[in-house]
Amino acid sequence: MSKEVLSQGEIDALLKTVEETGGEHFTDTEEEALIELTKLALESAVGAMSALTNRELELERPEIGLNRRSIAEKKIPAGTVCLGALFEGALTGQALWSTEGALSAVFCDILLGGDGTSPPEALGETQLNTMKEAFQNGLDASAVALSEALGERVKVSAGAINTAGAGHEEVPYFSDYDPDHIFVELTGKLSLPDLAEGELRLFYPAELARELLKRLTARQEADSGDEAAVGSDEEPEPPAEVPGGAPEPKKEARPKAAPAKAPGRVVGSAIKVQVQPAKFEGLKPVATAPEQQNIDLIMDVPLHLTVELGRTRMQVRQILALGAGAVIELDKLAGEPLDVLINGRLIAKGEVVIINENFGVRITDVVSQIERVQNLR
């Protein structure tokens, strides 16, 4: 076959691509950038959820594709947990995060205090809300990663969460777009080793992908401009005259240190600079006039007093597992003094007493008056 003529198979493939993508197209470089950014955000989210469940989640490198809404929504299997993700700040728009039902059920069982071996057959409102809270931790971590990559603040918050039905009628995210709207789809395999695995899909409109690439390009151009500015500052000194008419050899120009780049990014070649400890002159005391204070002005200001028995830290699954008769272990020993706080600041310690059938606190130790005033500031 000649280079000028396409086979019927090639023509059919081109027509199918145009039908599915509406003519929308991303270059190989743009697709690679979207994959890397998405991989960065998803790995940060998965890392946060691994810490939350104390289980190591594994994510494979995602693959990218373009589809009309009418085609994209059909790729979501029934039972898949779908979560809307709302972008604010440098990026505005919404995306859809979906995880397959079997994987979601195991993940939910672990969040609720199980070991993942007895997942629920169906996810009710309580289970979905629990997963939404866990997903929010992941979205917060991905927002930090995107903010560092783009050099601008990005906020991502969890929206509606639900389970896809057999006819996809229970995924309200797609109903906000017409059937021909073009979506970017990134798909990767997420697994809980020895427990479950499934597809993790991320859908977002093509215009949000374009905005993401625009912000990334702007960041790269700004970094390139910084490097160019550093290079332009390196000017050789003119040769100086020395006795005998021979010019003094040129001194080698010493490059200036490049400005710090965003964490996790390396731009251009490394510049070797000599680092020496800074030297400062000794500080001398300066006499100041005593501060005039008049505490009488605030004597009538109401304050909030709290007596704290103790504290503890609990995970989401532990809180959801609480019921009547549950015992919460605090960080104080029996008989240890209680903390007396004013507006959250410690001012004294005491012990519990009963006065006329009411609880009270007998002060056993008080911080100094100066410390009390300082704590109230």
Image (cartoon, rainbow, N blue to C red):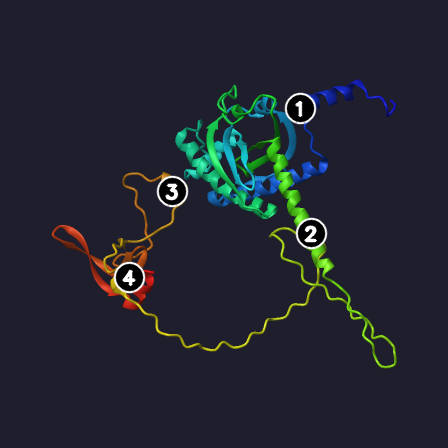
Residue 88 or residue 355, whichever sits in front:
88
Q: Please provide percent x and percent y for residue 34.
A: 64, 38
Which callout, 3 or 1, points at the residue further toward the start of the chain?
1
Looking at the image, which is closer to me, 307 or 323? 307
* Quarter of image, res 244: bottom right
User: What residue does disc 2 label?
Assistant: 225
Answer with the quarter of the image where residue 186 lies.
top right
What element does badge 3 sit on? Answer: helix
Mark closest to the chain's N terminus, 3 or 2:
2
Residue bearing mark 1: 22
What kind of residue is marked 3? Gln
Q: Does 259 sit left or right of 234 as displayed?
A: left
Assess whether mark 2 and mark 1 are in contact (beta carbons under 8 angstroms): no
Residue receiving disc 4: 347
Q: CA distance from mark 4 to mark 1?
A: 68 Å
Q: Image check: 298 left or right of 236?
A: left
For disc 3, the neighbor class at 10 Å (few under 14, some 14 to 19, many from 20) is few
Q: Position of residue 285 (x, y in %)?
A: 45, 77
Number of the front mark, 3 or 4? 4
Q: State the residue at coordinates (56%, 74%).
A: 280
Please tell me which of labels 4 and 1 falls first in the chain.
1
Task: Estimate the x, y position of residue 368 in percent, counting from the top left.
Answer: 28, 68
**Which label is found at residue 47?**
none
Give the spatial CA distance, label 3 vs label 4: 32 Å
Q: Nearer the viewer, mark 2 or mark 4?
A: 2
Is 303 above or below relative to 108?
below
Q: Amino acid at mark 4?
A: Ile
Amino acid at the residue labelled 2: Gly
* Number of other residues with Cα within 10 Å of mark 2, as a class: few under 14, some 14 to 19, many 20 or more: few
